[in-house]
Image (cartoon, rainbow, N blue to C red):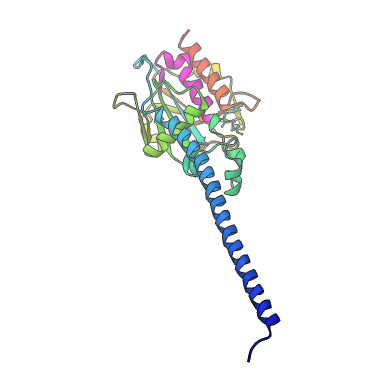
Amino acid sequence: MVRPYKVKGFKRKKREEEEYYEEKEVKEEENEREKTAAEVEEAEGEEEEDERRAEEAVDELPGIPVVPSNANAGAGVIIILERASLEVAKVGKTYQLLNSDDHVNFLLKHGKDPKNYRPDIAFQAILMILDSRLNKAGRLKALYVKTEKGVLFEIKPYVRMPRTFKRFSGLILQLLQKLTVNASGKRDKLLRVIKNPVTQYLPLNSRRIGLSHSAERMVKIQDYVNAANNDVNLVFVVGAMAHGKINTEYTDDFISVSGYQLSAAYCLGMICNALEQKWNIL
Ligand SMILES: C[S@@+](CC[C@H](N)C(=O)[O-])C[C@H]1O[C@@H](n2cnc3c(N)ncnc32)[C@H](O)[C@@H]1O
């Protein structure tokens, strides 16, 4: 049976229409794919740029310089920074030291409170200690830092620390990934991750003093250090976190040095000052 012309024409028109739309769809899909590829390329370019910058910060620190040391200069002090907020995570494609300014979205996405990510506290505290006259006079015998995650590391008192937060972050990143940072061109390990507990590195004749605003005993720090015998090594334990108390399990004494809540750096400044007075370091 022959189909009427009108029906045949209608079917052909319909097939042509279908082919047109199929072709259009394929073209659109191709365009979409090209567009997505371009977007991905652009995003990858940006990430690579971030990665390059992050790596640069670390590469600039293949080793760090030292300052002339004045070790064996008499009685000394050991400082321990507790609960330092120094945590590394993979953000995008690169590992970074987490901080509450740059990683808010990342931290919230992982259910963490940005307020607790304050590596700047440890940064300021470390600079305060290393810049002190006490250290320049060779009286800082050792500096230990324990992170919130329980990683313990040692910083040699004669290290020349980076002075910008970005470079400090690069240095800590390098330390936490490679476990040591050497002096430029030398094998001397200026920063190195060591085994817990910190107590195994403290001299036998040491007095461990924990500091907190909430300690019941408030002292005048100058009187307190003046009363200490020079044969005893003083070990001060100060928190490098934003909130909470330090671990006092291994301290012999627990003191407050002011009725105000102070920053770790200021508190360390008071300790250094008091010791500088006691030992007549100008
Ligand atoms: C930013 S505070 C931490 C805040 C915490 N609420 C506290 O007072 O321990 C950092 C560190 O500075 C020291 N600190 C602050 N104020 C102090 C005070 N009035 N007396 C002694 N140490 C203090 C503590 O070692 C503290 O862990």
Percent position (x, y) of residue 168?
47, 28
- Please provide percent x and percent y for residue 213: 61, 30
Residue lying at 58% horizontally and 64% vertically, measured from the top left: 23
Q: Which quarter shows the N terminus?
A: bottom right
**Is 45 one of the magenta-colored residues?**
no
Q: Report x, y in % for residue 35.
A: 57, 50
Q: Nearer the viewer, residue 247 or 81?
A: 81
Can you see residue 271? Answer: yes
Q: Quadrant of ligand 1?
A: top right
Q: Which residues are magenta?
A: 122-141
Residue 269, position as x, y percentages in the image? 54, 19
| The residue positioned farthest toward the left in the image shown | 187
User: Considering only vertical position in the picture, is 77 above or below 45?
Assistant: above
Magenta residue check for 140: yes
Quadrant hosting residue 229:
top left
In the image: residue 108, left or right of residue 77 = right
Q: Is residue 210 visible?
A: no
